[in-house]
Image (cartoon, rainbow, N blue to C red):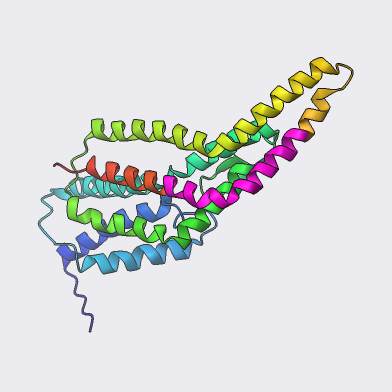
Amino acid sequence: MVNYSFSLLTFEYFILILVRISCFVYIAPFFGMQNTPGRVKVGLSFFVSLLLFQLVPKESLGYTGIVGYSIIVLKEGITGLLIGFAANICNSIILLAGNIIDINIGFSMATEYNPQMQTQASVTGNFYSYVVMLLLMITNMHHYILRAVADSYQLIPVNGQAFQWDHLMQGMLTYLINMFVIAFRIVLPVFACIMILNCILGIMAKVSPQMNMFAIGMQLKVLVGLTIMFLTISLFLNVSDFIFDEMKRTIVSMIKGMYAS
């Protein structure tokens, strides 16, 4: 039988737990998508907070007045946002790869709305983004993300944040470096084939100057690009492993930057 009893101290703790979890759910991938109903986000945040309420040790908060409590609320909100943001920004890897592919095959002028990043994205970037989101659910990566914010209370208790801005900035710089490396690995087959095609078109333009290589090249680039994407889609499971590993590393880096070792 589950027995919940609230006092003034425990209710203050529940509010702080709810703030961290709700800020995380608001921005985290899969949980914070634009097309996810708001009632689902609120309900998930409330029930996860209710479960964690029984597990988080309740110690004295040590604040004075409403201003002190507001500062603690702000710190808890920043903690949840940083953990969710660390997982969410890894979607930009696949969007960057899609943009590079579309620039090479000629789809860069066409953009669609991406509900995960809440911005305009290229056609290929949107397609790859949905594939990665599907693999995220199949591999239960969304469970890992939710467990990460739940386990963060072991290292970062309520009102126990010690923001190390140098460590957080170093983690973001490492992510930016890895983002370009992973994105280039994704686009390498298409990039290599398009480069070979450009060399062939350049040779043909010299051999047969009467042919309009610009008009022919546009159609060939689209055909070759889509063919290579079709042939390499089976390798996307390995691609998602790189993205999920980077997501785990970024989450761990963010959490390490918010507690005193």
In the displayed structure image, the side of residue 90 where residue 118 appears, left or right = right
Magenta highlight range: 220-243
Q: Is residue 219 placed above or below 149 in the rendered structure?
A: above
Pick the front one: 102 or 192: 192
Residue occupying the far bottom of the picture: 1
State the residue at coordinates (81%, 23%).
213
Q: Can you say which quadrant of the picture contains the N terminus?
A: bottom left
Residue 124: x, y in percent?
Answer: 62, 43
> Can residue 158 be seen by looking at this rendering?
no
Pick the front one: 181 or 149: 181
Residue 233: x, y in percent?
Answer: 59, 49
Q: Quadrant of residue 212?
A: top right
Predominant SS along the magenta part: helix
Q: Is residue 3 placed above or below 257 in the rendered structure?
A: below
- Mark count: 0
State the residue at coordinates (24%, 48%).
70
Whether 165 is among the magenta residues is: no
In the displayed structure image, the side of residue 70 where residue 32 appears, left or right = right
Pick the front one: 188 or 91: 188
> Can residue 207 be seen by looking at this rendering?
yes
Residue occupying the far right of the picture: 210
State the residue at coordinates (59%, 40%).
120
Residue 148: x, y in percent?
Answer: 30, 55
Q: Can you say which quadrant of the picture contains the C terminus?
A: top left
Pick the front one: 97 or 208: 208
Residue 169: x, y in percent?
Answer: 30, 31
